[in-house]
Amino acid sequence: MPVSIDAALDEATAQATHKAVLLRRPLGYALQAALAGAFVGVAVVLLASVAGPLAATSSPFLKLVEGGVFGIALTLVVFAGAELFTGNNMVMLIGWLRGGVSGREAVLVNLAALVGNFVGAVLFAAMVHASGVLDTVAKAGGRPAGDGIIATIVTGKMHASDGQLFWRAVLCNMLVCLGVWMAYRTKNDTAKLVVLFWALLAFVASGFEHSVANMTIFSLAIMHHDATWGDLFHNLLFTVPGNAVGGALVVGLPYLLSVGSRRRGPVTEPDEAREVALV
């Protein structure tokens, strides 16, 4: 049976407090944010590796497989522990409006996560490029399938209008944050895995826009000369605010308003957060 919405809001508030405390150790926070960028990159490379050959044969199962494997991204972030910008959009809004963090802390945590995610995503993409792993999954007589599907995905993103990028990003982080939110509403690890899987299956198979995933996708395409840094930053110009709206205003705010977005004073910081802050 899921825990109450109010209890889930308390959990999110406690997590926001933990994140604000961790940010007081900039290097520690930067490392966790970079790891999150790399963890999402793992899902991107897995997607390219297993879905690339399907794309080369125009398989009708392509979208289903892409969505089916991408769940590793949020699984790694949640269970290994890392600071992901898109999830923080919801958590920090709840923490601010419930009195667990200040508005300044909420903004700084989101900005630090975004920058750290970018660094981790680019570094991970560079390692993957150096490994040549996406060049080894090839169709006979054609372009490597892994490399090819990255180029195809990026081309589609570059041809989307600015408005389409924004609304696809809103829809994406609505689903990502719903996955995180549902994970807060259960104490069972198996249930957490299931809800995270379904949320990411829906966003990837539907073709929505995740700013952090795009950091790795475009970086790989840039290293294969299929895109430019300008293309990446143009994409982020619309997907970053879209993700913020989807997570904070479409998911976090409605649940707050449903039980009352009252400030209740600072939430007691979890013991684990204090321990991390003192290490």
Image (tube, helix red, strand yellow):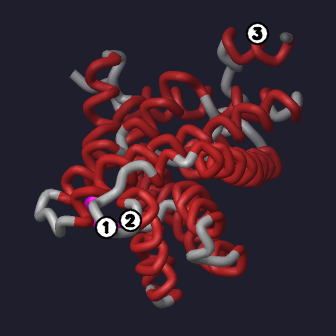
Instruction: Report the residue at 36% width, 40% height from top.
Output: 71
Q: In the picture provided, is 252 more to the left or to the right than 273?
A: left
Q: CA distance from mark 2 to mark 1?
A: 16 Å
Instruction: Tell me which label, 3 or 2, sits earlier in the chain.
Output: 2
Q: Nearer the viewer, mark 3 or mark 2?
A: 2
Residue 275 - label: 3
Q: In the picture provided, is 194 more to the left or to the right than 93?
A: left
Instruction: Relative to 10, say whether 73 is above or below.
Output: below
Amino acid at circle 1: Gly
Instruction: Tell me which label, 3 or 1, sits earlier in the chain.
Output: 1
Quadrant, the C terminus: top right
Amino acid at circle 2: Ile
Chief secondary structure of the magenta span? Answer: helix
Instruction: Tell me which label, 2 or 1, sits earlier in the chain.
Output: 1
Amino acid at circle 3: Glu
Instruction: Report the residue at 39% width, 68% height from top.
Output: 143
Instruction: Report the residue at 14% width, 63% height from top.
Output: 59
Quarter of the view holding residue 202: bottom left
Graded by Cα atoms within 10 Å as few (under 14), some (14 to 19) or many (20 or more), the crowding at tag 3 reads few
Q: Secondary structure at mark 3?
A: helix
Part of the protein shown in magenta: 203-207
Q: Secondary structure at mark 2?
A: helix
Residue 29, can we see it? yes
219 or 275, nearer to the observer: 219
Q: Which residue is mark 2?
A: 149
Quarter of the view holding residue 207: bottom left
